[in-house]
Image: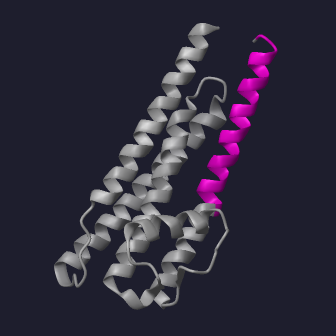
Amino acid sequence: MADMAARTMVAICRVALTGALVVGLYYLVPVEPGVSGARLAWRTAGTVVAGLVVTWLIIRQLSAQVSDPEESPLAGLLTALIGGVVFFALADFVTAVSDPAQFVDLHTKTDALYFALATLTTVGYGDVHAVGQVGRGVVVVQLVFNVAFIATGASVLTGALGARVRNRGSGR
């Protein structure tokens, strides 16, 4: 029993540290206004590749959870979900920096992270919102991604946690 508690604590610490690292790296990514030409093409290509990698990681973690919910580590799925939120925060910020008319009151990376989380949780306070067509397009992709992957991942995560708690309670 003590071994199980120690492993659980290690997993929690690993997710917390990885999540902090992902968010820390998010704040370190340089984003400057007025990028055009080849640099804009590279930035766009990098964003698409990063989005595909995050999507692949979430799909991979979801597949592992569905195929073997008892043995698959939940830490990977939770970390992938954090990566999805941070990816869209960065996409929102890059859009706002590239064209400030695309968002209202999105000026900092913290604003973008706040907006990504408000969009994910469907709170939508309205203080930060997309007004331009490109900004709204980014938000539409973000909403579809949230429903298709983040919500599914959160559902699988909570189901797996519940099953593990029930199994531990029954002595399995």
Q: Position of residue 80 (x, y in %)?
A: 49, 46
Residue range in magenta is 147-171
**Residue at 62% across, 35% down:** 65
Q: Is residue 17 above or below residue 128?
A: above
Q: Position of residue 15 (x, y in %)?
A: 48, 36
Q: Quadrant of residue 167?
A: top right
Q: Quadrant of residue 77?
A: top right
Q: Is residue 170 above or below residue 153?
A: above
**Residue at 54% across, 42% down:** 78
Residue closest to the eye, 122 or 68:
122
Tell whether position 80 is magenta: no
Tell whether position 168 is magenta: yes
**Residue at 53% across, 72% down:** 141
**Residue at 71% across, 25% down:** 164
Q: Position of residue 64 (x, y in %)?
A: 57, 35
Q: Is residue 81 above or below residue 43?
A: above
Please give the count of numbered marks on the rendered protein: 0
Image quadrant where one finds the N terminus = top right
Q: Main secondary structure of the magenta part?
A: helix
Question: Farthest residue toward the right?
Answer: 170
Image quadrant where one finds the C terminus = top right
Residue closest to the eye, 138 or 124:
124
Residue closest to the eye, 142 or 2:
2
Q: Is residue 47 left or right of residue 64?
A: left
